[in-house]
Image (tube, grey):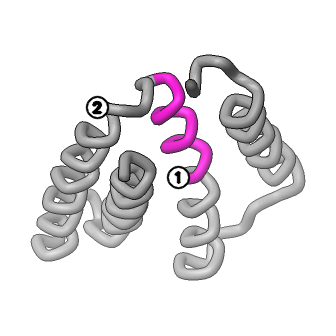
């Protein structure tokens, strides 16, 4: 159940981050409210997952998956460009998350 909470935390955080752009510097009220609500929900689910998953592991997964999802939203929804060095950096982050989850004793 802890990983379900973590997945929900990541999804709500990515949604909130996406609406930060849509809020236009917090000048548009509806996107701003979406940011606030989704961040509260994200941190609530993060707090639930931290009852079981160590903070270091949860945050590594949160940041790795969050980065990938945010990049995908940036490229496909906001039509932003991503270059090869950015892709390589993201792949390194994902490799780090995979190494932590499959090889670190901290996940046990």
Q: Give the vertical position of 84 relative to 79 (above or below).
A: above
At x 29%, y 66%, the residue is 24
Query: Foreground residue, 101 or 66?
Result: 101
Residue 67 belongs to the span the image colors magenta: no
Q: Give the vertical position of 44 relative to 81 (above or below).
A: above
Q: Give the vertical position of 10 relative to 33 (above or below).
A: above
Q: Mark on residue 66?
A: 1
- Magenta: main secondary structure: helix
Rendering coords of residue 7 (x, y %): 43, 57
Rendering coords of residue 69 (x, y %): 57, 63
Rendering coords of residue 53 (x, y %): 42, 32
- The residues bearing labels 2 and 1 have C-alpha atoms spaced at a distance of 20 Å
**Is the residue marked by circle 2 packed among few (<14), some (14-19), or many (20+) residues within 10 Å?**
few
Rendering coords of residue 98 (x, y %): 74, 40
**Is the residue marked by circle 1 packed among few (<14), some (14-19), or many (20+) residues within 10 Å?**
many
Q: Mark on residue 51?
A: 2
At x 17%, y 64%, the residue is 32
Find the magenta span and give its range: 56-65
At x 74%, y 47%, the residue is 90
Circle 2 — which element? loop
Residue 57 belongs to the span the image colors magenta: yes
At x 21%, y 72%, the residue is 31
Query: Foreground residue, 98 or 2?
Result: 2
């Amino acid at each position: 159940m802890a990983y379900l909470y973590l997945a929900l935390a990541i999804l709500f955080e990515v949604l909130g981050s996406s609406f930060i752009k849509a809020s236009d510097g917090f000048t548009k009220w509806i996107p701003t409210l979406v940011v606030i609500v989704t961040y509260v929900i994200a941190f609530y689910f993060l707090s639930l997952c931290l009852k079981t998953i160590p903070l270091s592991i949860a945050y590594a997964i949160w940041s790795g998956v969050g980065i990938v999802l945010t990049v995908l939203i940036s490229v496909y929804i906001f039509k932003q460009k991503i270059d090869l060095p950015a892709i390589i950096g993201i792949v390194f982050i994902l490799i780090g998350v995979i190494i932590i989850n499959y090889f670190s004793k901290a996940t046990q």
